[in-house]
Image: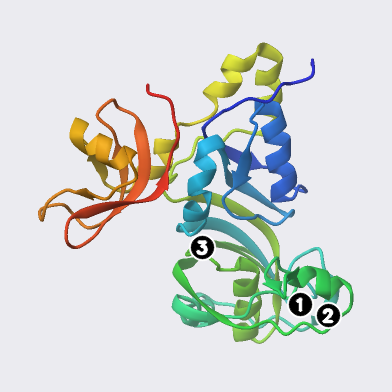
Amino acid sequence: MSRRTFHDIHGILLLDKPLGLSSNQALQTARRLVGAAKGGHTGSLDPLATGLLPLCFGEATKIAGWLLGSRKAYEAEVKLGATTTTADLEGDIVETRPVPELDDALIEAALAPLRGRITQVPPAYSAIKQDGVPLYVRARRGEAVDVPSREVDVYRLEVIGRAGDTLRLHVECGSGTYVRSLAVDLGANLGCGAHLTGLRRLWVEPFMAPAMVTLDDLRAAAETGPDPLEACVLPIDAGLAHIPRVQLDAAQTRVLGFGQPVPLGAGAAPGRCGVWGDDGRLMALGEVGPEGILRVLRGFNLPAP
């Protein structure tokens, strides 16, 4: 393949991250294949995790941080009877304990406290930063790591399969939730310890039924030309599909174009919204206040359609 040139591409790629790559490695590989000058991802997946990693290119990077806080779903595999230093397969085994005789009632009693708004201690081997240094860097140095607890939301947590001492779980959770920590806490509740042995992200709101693209798909498209590659990239508004759309008229478009708040009237629904100009161009991620005033949270510099 000839050397790829980089240019302005604005949109979202729903990558099926492969096993073994960090999120940044997957991002940079996809960005080079697509030829996007600028890119970012919407929340890390561990190297041992696979599945949906939304990548934002060009102006779409302006909503990457917002998508990071979205609701997510995973399929997790949890091995009971052993804890590890990293709470997953990468770490060394710290302790092994016998697994109790499992039945549905015992498992449900262990899962129930892990649902809802819960307090969770993230793994010491995580990307959370203290004094600008990721915790995993400190842990790998052998430093004592004091990980503060945090409140997170677990909307759904249930067993979808069981084979011996291994459970398969469906998890739906909010931003900042560590599935590895859920595995550790489940093992503690059962009295035998546990660690995560597999994780696949199924969806990230608003991409609830994602048509994911693999790196091999991108490589094959790159052999054909730029058009098949760019066809893999969704428009930015795909990332705004779950919030209201505000359509401005010509006068309102001019006001917003000057960076000024736009009065929409008392009947406007408050909250975040996507904002389109009278020429059909996506102009901003906005927020309507209780008084009906539209203000820009992030503006987009996109060509007219």
Circle 2 Cα neighbour tier, 10 Å, few/some/many (<14 / 14–19 / ≥20): few
On the rendered image, what quadrant is the C terminus found in?
A: top left
The residue positioned 72% from the left and 70% from the top of the image is 132
Instruction: Tell me how far mark 1 sits from mark 3, CA to CA.
Output: 20 Å
Let me know if residue 249 appears in the view: no
Q: According to the image, label 3 marks what residue? A: 171
Instruction: Tell me how far mark 1 sits from mark 2, CA to CA.
Output: 6 Å
Q: According to the image, label 1 marks what residue? A: 83
Q: Residue furthest front?
A: 258
Lateral position of residue 28 relative to residue 155, left or right: right
Q: Residue furthest right?
A: 141
The answer to which image quadrant residue 145 occupies is bottom right
Instruction: Give the residue type that dot 1 points to.
Output: Thr
Q: According to the image, label 2 marks what residue? A: 94
The answer to which image quadrant residue 107 occupies is bottom right
Q: Which of the marked residues, 1 or 3, is nearer the chain's N terminus?
A: 1
